[in-house]
Image (spheres, rainbow, N blue to C red):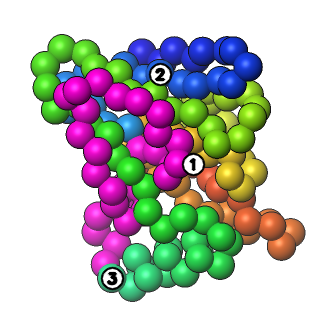
Amino acid sequence: MITLFAEEMQFLEIELDPYETVIAEPGSFMMMDEDIQMKTMFGDGSQNDEGIWGKVFQAGKRVLTGEKLFMTAFTHVGDGKQKVSFASPYPGKIIPMNLTGDEGRIICQKDSFLCVAKGVSVGIEFSRNLAEVFLEEKDS
């Protein structure tokens, strides 16, 4: 369950089931319950079989566009439901997006990504000399 709190500064609270994971941009974490485990990883963790050169290529694209190389996975390792919260480092409006529409892909402005369910690919899209982040739902 996702809860969006709208005050002067918005933040997003996500309720995780056991062993459910959410991936977040560095600097967006706000607070978490006791059974949530944090793990820093290279990239978004959606492509474990791409090999060393695939990872180097992805890292090169991220460095060229000024994006961060690492992301953080938040996994609920206990029983019941637990919550983890995220906020943007900048003032603005948080808009939840559903990837089942829009052909399973959303392209957004640099630094506008906050968090996503594990298994969704977060990449870099080049268009008109600007780097944009795209989110793509991967078949599991």
Mark 2 closeness class: few <14, some 14–19, many ≥20 residues within 10 Å: some
Residue at image mark 1: 135
Q: Secondary structure at mark 3?
A: helix
Whether the residues at callouts 1 and 3 have beta carbons within 8 Å, the answer is no
Quadrant where the N terminus sits is top left
Residue at the left extreme, as displayed: 79
- Which residues are the magenta region? 23-51
- Residue 52 got which mark? 3
Looking at numbered disc 1 in the image, what kind of residue is underneath it?
A: Leu
Left/right of residue 115 with respect to residue 126 in the rendered view = left
Looking at numbered disc 2 in the image, what kind of residue is underneath it?
A: Glu
Q: What's the distance in space between the residues labelled 1 and 2, CA to CA?
A: 20 Å
Residue at image mark 2: 13
Q: Quadrant of residue 129?
A: bottom right
Q: What's the distance in space between the residues labelled 2 and 3, CA to CA?
A: 35 Å
Q: Secondary structure at mark 2?
A: strand
Q: Residue at x 44, y 82 (%)?
A: 56
Q: Earlier in the sequence, mark 1 or mark 3?
A: 3
